């Protein structure tokens, strides 16, 4: 039935279109195609003053790619509030006029399909859909699937908004067992992995938003095509993820995913919005979930869930990388932040030596005052790295007890965070920001007083979005050497790729991506 992309044989990328005019809908169809969509989902219920015959004729005669027609009633989460027969007649008309796919709700499926299949126009493929406001249990989902199969629709479509990322696993379970083509989606940031990992478990279609028309929880068409290369994902693909909260700012996927493909390694790296570490590791315990990066705010707390940790982690007390042992499934924690940040600072200091430095010392950090803002996971890595190079560390943190704990561990000094603004360092000191201050979207704040920046020889900012933060701009203007968090990000990612794949990371290739994309 039909002569376009057969969903059960070909994975497709679909862009949902919600333009409010027919003219904009046609324009958006062309934009979606240009950005990599295989088909578009046209939401008729979003078109103002929608008139079925003339509007559908314009849309379908001008379509540059296959079209999936949706006319969603309010009782199923849509915008249409009119007569039900009128709505169904519009869907019938879409079938007659050459729509490639028709989406309709389970509630009306039996009667609608019976009438359509008795008509002379059955070129479209039929999708029976069910969108749920609450998250169903696995058993309830299984029963729902069986009911939907009885409609004998060509494709089954299910969606819900998860309260936690662990609830997406129910969808993966269903898709992997379903014996008919299935479209499955979970909404919002916590549901993002339903699109990225859906093809691994058998989903036949994934959704992607157009640039400039972002939809929360949907990857862009460009990222699906370029970063994630969704066509290459299969049941053998190993899953790696960034465990963080929030997670949308991360640029890890645009570095790790191309690197996997460059190495011909079958892996995907996905952002994972995590609320509960214990539940996450309980639910996603499969060997397919092979490794993780760990971001804010979990670098310290996650140690509790590691079965083993590298000796460096024992000293630092923070993890930024986890590997699941292929032999026994144990979670092993590592820290690649420490060397990444310190070597980036050291190399910058060697390039611009300070006239008070002692060239006989092994590290240009030796005996320098190292002023650290932030005693969290990244801060701990910086503090231990600086101490290992012989620097004198002073720690500022909004949690003074945490600052004292870290300072004690590195034989340093702790001070309240509010004192940092008026703190006057000795000439030639190093400043390292390991707080979220300056991170997008809160880009205007810096942790120190601008007038003190002239006293620092070098300023490092662990924030890498934006690439040059306000702190770095002010420090550069004051004459300091600056080191971006992008450099730390690259170096720690190289260490992670080594651990993720068990191979040597392609350093030059990764640096080229960072220079081009960050």
Image: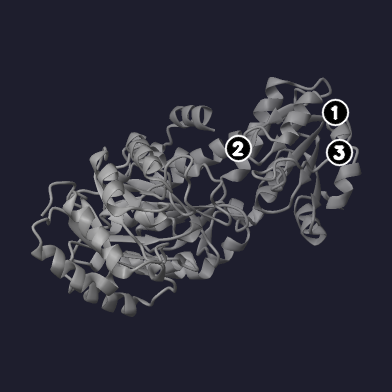
Q: Give the foreground label among 3 and 2.
A: 3
Q: Earlier in the sequence, mark 3 or mark 2?
A: 3
Picture quadrant of residue 192: bottom left
The mark lying in front, picked from 2 and 1, is: 1
Residue 365: % across, % down = 74, 33
Kindly identify which numbered label has been placed on residue 301.
none
Per the image, label 1 sits on a secondary structure element best described as: helix
The answer to whether any part of residue 8 appears in the image is no
Task: Give the image location of residue 165, x and y in percent.
Answer: 47, 64
Residue 454's tag is 1
Do the numbered discs 3 and 2 sit on residues whose CB atoms are within 8 Å?
no
Task: Determine which residue is flagged by label 3.
Answer: 449
Mark 3 and mark 2: Cα distance apart in space: 24 Å
x and y percentages locating residue 429 in the rendered image: 82, 33
Instruction: Give the vertical position of 500 relative to 165 (above or below).
Output: above
Query: In screen coordinates, is 338 left or right of 233?
Result: right
Judge whether 104 appears above or below 290 on screen.
below
Q: Quadrant of the N terminus?
A: bottom left
Q: Quick one: label 1 or label 3, which is nearer the N terminus?
A: 3
In the rendered view, would you say 147 is above or below 353?
Answer: below
In depth, the one of 244 and 410 nearer the eye is 244
Mark number displayed over residue 488: 2
Quadrant of the drawing holding the C terminus: top right
At horizontal 41% and vertical 41% (from top left) the residue drawn is: 223
The residue shown at (38%, 77%) is 137
Between 369 and 196, the one lying in front of the other is 196
Give how far apart the Cα atoms at labels 1 and 3 are: 10 Å
């Amino acid at each position: 039935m039909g002569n376009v992309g057969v969903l059960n044989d070909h994975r497709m990328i679909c862009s949902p279109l919600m333009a409010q005019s027919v003219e904009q809908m046609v324009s958006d169809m062309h934009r979606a195609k240009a950005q990599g969509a295989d088909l578009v989902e046209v939401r008729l219920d979003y078109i103002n003053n929608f008139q079925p015959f003339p509007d559908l004729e314009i849309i379908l005669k001008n379509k540059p790619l296959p079209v999936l027609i949706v006319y969603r009633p309010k009782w199923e989460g849509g915008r249409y509030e009119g007569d039900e027969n009128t709505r169904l007649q519009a869907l019938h008309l879409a079938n007659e006029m050459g729509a490639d796919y028709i989406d309709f709700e389970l509630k009306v499926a039996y009667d609608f399909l019976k009438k359509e299949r008795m008509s002379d126009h059955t070129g479209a493929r039929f999708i029976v859909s069910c969108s749920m406001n609450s998250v169903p249990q696995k058993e309830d989902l299984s029963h729902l699937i069986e009911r939907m199969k009885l409609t004998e629709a060509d494709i089954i479509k299910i969606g819900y908004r998860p309260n936690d990322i662990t609830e997406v696993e129910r969808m993966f379970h269903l898709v992997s067992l379903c014996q008919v083509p299935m479209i499955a989606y979970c909404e919002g940031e916590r549901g993002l992995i339903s699109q990225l990992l859906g093809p691994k478990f058998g989903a036949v279609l994934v959704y992607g938003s157009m640039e400039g028309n972002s939809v929360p929880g949907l990857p862009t068409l460009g990222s699906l095509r370029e970063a994630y290369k969704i066509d290459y994902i299969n049941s053998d693909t190993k899953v790696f993820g960034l465990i963080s909260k929030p997670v949308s700012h991360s640029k890890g996927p645009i570095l790790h995913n191309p690197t996997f493909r460059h190495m011909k390694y079958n892996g995907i790296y996905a952002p994972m919005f995590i609320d509960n570490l214990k539940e996450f590791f309980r639910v996603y315990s499969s060997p397919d979930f092979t490794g993780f990066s760990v971001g804010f705010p979990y670098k310290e707390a996650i140690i509790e869930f590691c079965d083993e940790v590298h000796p460096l982690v024992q000293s630092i007390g923070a993890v930024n990388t986890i590997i699941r042992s292929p032999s026994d499934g144990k979670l092993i924690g590592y820290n690649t932040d420490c060397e990444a940040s310190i070597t980036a600072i050291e190399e910058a200091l060697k390039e611009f030596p300070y006239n008070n430095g002692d060239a006989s010392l092994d590290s240009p950090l030796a005996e320098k005052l190292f002023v650290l803002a932030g005693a969290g996971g990244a801060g701990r890595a910086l503090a231990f790295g600086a101490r290992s190079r012989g620097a004198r560390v002073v720690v500022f943190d909004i949690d003074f007890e945490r600052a004292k704990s870290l300072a004690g561990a590195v034989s340093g000094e702790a001070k309240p965070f509010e004192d940092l603004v008026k703190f006057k360092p000795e000439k030639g000191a190093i400043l390292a920001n390991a707080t979220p201050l300056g991170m997008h979207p809160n880009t205007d704040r810096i942790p120190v007083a601008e007038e003190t920046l002239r006293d620092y020889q070098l300023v490092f900012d662990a924030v890498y979005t934006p690439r040059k933060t306000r702190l770095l701009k002010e420090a550069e203007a004051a004459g300091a050497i600056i080191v971006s968090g992008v450099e730390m990000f690259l170096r720690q990612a190289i260490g992670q790729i080594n651990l993720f794949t068990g191979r040597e990371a392609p350093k030059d290739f990764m640096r080229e991506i960072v220079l081009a994309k960050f």
